């Protein structure tokens, strides 16, 4: 329960992300707001105050947020969702290759360098 409370404590960042993405998960389109969390692309500790910029995150369903943080889900150079081999054959398989849902304003789109950092450093994909 502490992890849920801690993540939900990012209320301003979460509110900004939800508004930017029309209150939907950026990977599934899920609109059950109580299931959506504010996922940082680059950890806040790496970027300080800039970590809560809208272009450093997206709203994700809670399960996808965990998988993203563990490196089992990432976004490729073409802004398509990719999955680790650990998720082959799972209920997440239909997400593989699907485009990331765009925010309503282009300036809120995830920063490509942030996505690349996550892809290489967290998901262990080649640069």
Image (cartoon, rainbow, N blue to C red):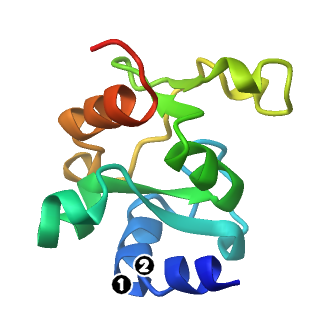
| Residue 118 in which image quadrant | top left
**Does residue 70 sit above or below 50 in this rendering?**
above
Q: Is residue 125 left or right of residue 50?
A: right
Tag 2 residue? 15
Q: With 15 as the anchor, is 28 left or right in this view?
A: right
SS at badge 1? helix
Say few, some or many: other residues with alpha carbon within 10 Å of mark 1 (under 14 / 14 to 19 / 20 or more): few
Residue identifier under label 1: 12
Quadrant including the C terminus: top left
Q: Give coordinates of residue 120: x percent, y percent.
A: 33, 26
Q: Secondary structure at mark 2?
A: helix
Query: At which x and y percent is residue 91?
Result: 85, 33
- Tell me which residue sits at (62%, 45%) in the image: 67
Marks 2 and 1, how far apart in space? 5 Å
Query: Quarter of the image containing the N terminus?
Result: bottom right
Q: Residue placed at 59% from the left, 86% from the top? A: 5
Q: Are marks 2 and 1 in contact (CB under 8 Å)?
A: yes
Q: Is residue 46 left or right of residue 119?
A: left
Residue count near mark 2 (Cα–Cα under 10 Å), binned few <14, some 14–19, many ≥20: some
> Image point 75% across, 26% down: which residue?
87
Q: Position of residue 98 (x, y in %)?
A: 59, 24
Q: Which mark is residue 83?
A: none
Residue at x 44% of width, y 74% of height: 14
């Amino acid at each position: 329960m502490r992890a849920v409370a801690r993540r939900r404590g990012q209320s301003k960042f979460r509110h900004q992300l939800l508004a930017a993405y029309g209150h939907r998960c950026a990977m599934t389109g899920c609109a059950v707001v109580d299931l959506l969390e504010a996922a940082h692309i680059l950890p806040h500790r790496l970027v300080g105050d800039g970590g809560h910029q809208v272009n450093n995150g997206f709203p994700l369903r809670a399960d996808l947020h965990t998988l993203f943080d563990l490196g089992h889900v990432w976004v490729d150079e073409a802004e398509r969702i990719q999955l680790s081999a650990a998720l082959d054959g799972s209920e997440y398989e239909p997400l593989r290759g699907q485009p990331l849902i765009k925010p309503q304003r282009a300036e809120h789109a995830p920063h490509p360098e942030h996505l690349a950092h996550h892809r290489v450093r967290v998901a262990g994909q080649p640069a």
